[in-house]
Amino acid sequence: MDCLFCAIINGDIPSKKVYEDEYCYAFLDINPQAPVHCLVVPKAHISSADDITKENSTAVANIFVAIPKIAAELGLKNGYRIVSNIGEDGCQSVKHLHFHILGGTKLTENMA
Ligand code: 5GP
Ligand code: ZN
């Protein structure tokens, strides 16, 4: 499968790793939208949050267990935002489920 984030997880494309465990990989976004901008992806390919099922949900649950550790690693003591874009209207550009962790400043109240 031709998937950018699968290639990053496999190490075929270099990335700045922040965290890794059995189920997920976290790395810095190449085009940061905030002072701290990290992406967390499941190691198993899931196309988007719209493709989460009971069968693949363990990996997703694990991501949300990992996120507080990742946020601490990134020094986000004062809060942060988690975003996942889905499909055309959600402006998802990479079709491998990912959660953006954004922080390092007071974020805008706008979400759309
Ligand atoms: P989306 O728009 O799908 O929600 O988010 C995709 C994100 O992946 C974007 O924020 C974009 O900057 C990031 N991205 C795209 N290509 C690469 C890459 O090769 N390396 C890294 N680290 N991030 C990437
Ligand atoms: Zn993938």
Image (cartoon, helix red, strand yellow):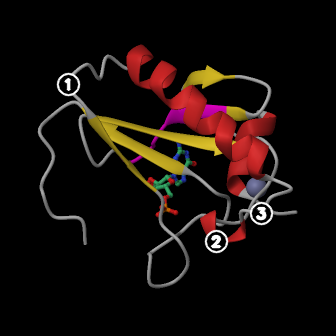
Residue corresponding to mark 2? 50
**In the structure shown, which secondary structural element does the residue marked by tag 3 occupy?**
loop
Residue at the extreme bottom: 89
Q: Quadrant of the N terminus?
A: bottom right
Q: Is residue 76 above or below residue 1?
A: above
Q: How many C-alpha atoms fall within 10 Å of the one at disc 2: few (<14), some, or many (≥20)?
A: few
What's the amino acid at mark 2?
Answer: Asp
Residue corresponding to mark 1? 78
Q: What whole-number distance in Å separates the C-alpha atoms at marks 3 and 1?
A: 32 Å
Q: Is residue 26 magenta?
A: yes
Q: Is mark 1 within 8 Å of ligand 1?
A: no
Looking at the image, which is closer to me, 47 or 55?
55
Residue at position x 46%, y 25% in the image? 68
Q: Position of residue 51 (x, y in %)?
A: 72, 69
Q: Which residues are magenta?
A: 25-31
Residue corresponding to mark 3? 53
